[in-house]
Image (cartoon, helix red, strand yellow):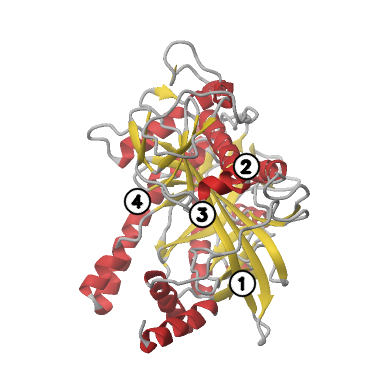
Amino acid sequence: MTGGRHVLLLSMAALSAGCVTQIERTPLQAQRLAAAPRVSLACAVTLVEVVDARPGGESAGVYNGRALQFARAPDLVREHLVAAGVGTGEATEGMRLTVQLKRLYMAQQHAVNTPVVVLQAQLGDTPPFLIRPQVPSVNWWGSEAELYDDLGAAVARANTQLVQGLNQRCPKAARG
Amino acid sequence: MKRVWCAAACLAIVSLPVHAAKPEPLPMPVAQQLPVDIVLGQQELAVEVPASGAATGAAVGGLLGALIGTAIDKAAVSNAEERVVELRNLLVDYPFNQRAEAALRAGVASDGLSPAPQITTCDAPAAVGGGGMVVVAGLSFGCSVVPAKGVLVVSPRYAIDNRFQNLAVRLHVALIDRETKSNGKPKLRLVSSHQYQFNYPLEALDGQKPDDNAARWIALGSDQLEAMLDYGIDQTIQMMAYDFSEAGRTERGEKKRGSTFFKGESFNGQQVRAADHWVWTRLNAGLPLHGYYPVRAGALPAVAVASDTGMAAQTEGAVTPPAADAAATEAPSAPVTDAVPATEAAPATEPAPAAAVDAGAGS
């Protein structure tokens, strides 16, 4: 082996030994996620609860060296639904809605971000239905802003589809 | 920019010959109270897409090449993510991480690894990368960067390929030393690395496209898929225990050649162990251990028969209960190109029936 090759190998080894990325635990900030859905409810619905049914708990995936944590995810879903016209608390008008937050995480593969939000909703005695929007996008910069844009878009789309799903299940007589 | 240089160096290292000293054989067991970090970072069934865009982008070159490569990868990932939706919905209540953790807690205590392992779990590695001259994809520090010698880092994973031909449960296992550099940054020394993968290859049919294959997996149903994944978890843990056993260590060091013919299909590697429905193979000394459980068209894998909803069992005639796999035989030496009949040897435990999923779930 030539001396030059030794030097090359040693340099590569030194560089590769330094290729360590420490994973930072990063809490997600709910206020930085996108706005509530733009659709409105077509009939009266009262939200019983948004259940946190994520098997991984607060863990929301790993994004560019950050282990994402999102404790307030069910609250965010609730706020978006209320903004769309869902009643809460004392309101007893209309059909009763229970939502389970099954997943909320960011996945990455080959510089493509795939934010995932899965909701299961049950309106009254109707069969439960699943919402799982697909919004993969290119991970251009790997920045925090990009993370919030992508994940926020997925949350907004999931809530929009949820409201649309509720509207489809509204009793015909109750539709506005 | 620093990351780009690091990535370039890591990639270059992979392609260069490495003249490392022959590693010292591991003690038996590896340690009496082996620290074991289980990293449970997966949120759902992964769909694995080969990085085809990078090669095309490199061939074109420049910014245009990078954009073309990115567009190719985005289209491939989007298609795969779209296709896997229904399969993920079927498995939305399947607690893979909890099942894997419970099975590992029960199975990692073994003669070759440790009689009293000290288990820690986490949902993300504390750090990734490093390893010095040996570059292993996704090398993880485990749950901490606190210096420690001889930590076994175990990372379970379940995935389907983007053509939907193979469902797999994988266990990446690395024995590492965690150190701290003089500048205070964490450093990892890889002592040994192992991979155990249990595959469910779907029988190839003429003209079948990924969408057709996806429909065949979906037709199995959630209970059956869960039973198969449970069994895959169990098999990978048995592979790990075997690999560190006296017999496994001997077999792992032996040279191998040829392929294995099993259930009408040819699989890479020489047969290591077989039972009625599956075979383990290894391509050559020191390489990963693979298990194959072929899934025939129009038939329910016997492992999923406990959750049968009326499909034909994979075995002809009477339905064979999963316990039929309890009789396995080892073939650690001499190239074998066909499965041998099962004999009484190593019992393979059958996982408990999977819990029923929410029957009403579905979009």
Question: Which residue corresponds to the image point at 37% horizontal and 48% vertical from the top-left?
Answer: B162
Q: Give x and y (percent) for residue B356.
A: 61, 29
Question: Which residue corresponds to the image point at 44% horizontal and 71% vertical from the top-left?
Answer: B18
Residue of label 4: B79
Same chain assignment for discs 2 and 4: yes
Q: In this view, does A72 lie to the left or right of B161?
A: right
Q: Mark 1 lies on which chain?
A: B
Q: Give x and y (percent) for residue B59.
A: 22, 71
State the separation of the CA atoms marked 1 and 2: 31 Å
The quarter holding residue B78 reads bottom left
Mark 1: amino acid: Leu
Q: Mark 2 and mark 4 in contact? Answer it, CB < 8 Å.
A: no
Q: Mark 1 and mark 2 in contact? Answer it, CB < 8 Å.
A: no
Residue of label 2: B95
State the separation of the CA atoms marked 3 and 1: 32 Å
Q: Which label belongs to residue B137?
A: none
Residue of label 1: B188
Bin the neighbour count of mark 1 within 10 Å (Cα to Cα): few under 14, some 14-19, many 20 and up.
Answer: many
Same chain assignment for discs 2 and 3: no
Same chain assignment for discs 4 and 3: no
What kind of element bears circle 2?
loop
Q: Mark 4 and mark 3 in contact? Answer it, CB < 8 Å.
A: no
State the separation of the CA atoms marked 4 and 1: 37 Å
What kind of element bears circle 3?
strand
How many marks are shown on the rendered structure? 4
Q: Is residue B56 left or right of residue B17?
A: left
Mark 4: amino acid: Asn
The quarter holding residue A33 reads bottom right
- Mark toward the start of the polypeptide (1 vs 2): 2
- Mark toward the viewer: 4 or 1: 1
Same chain assignment for discs 4 and 1: yes
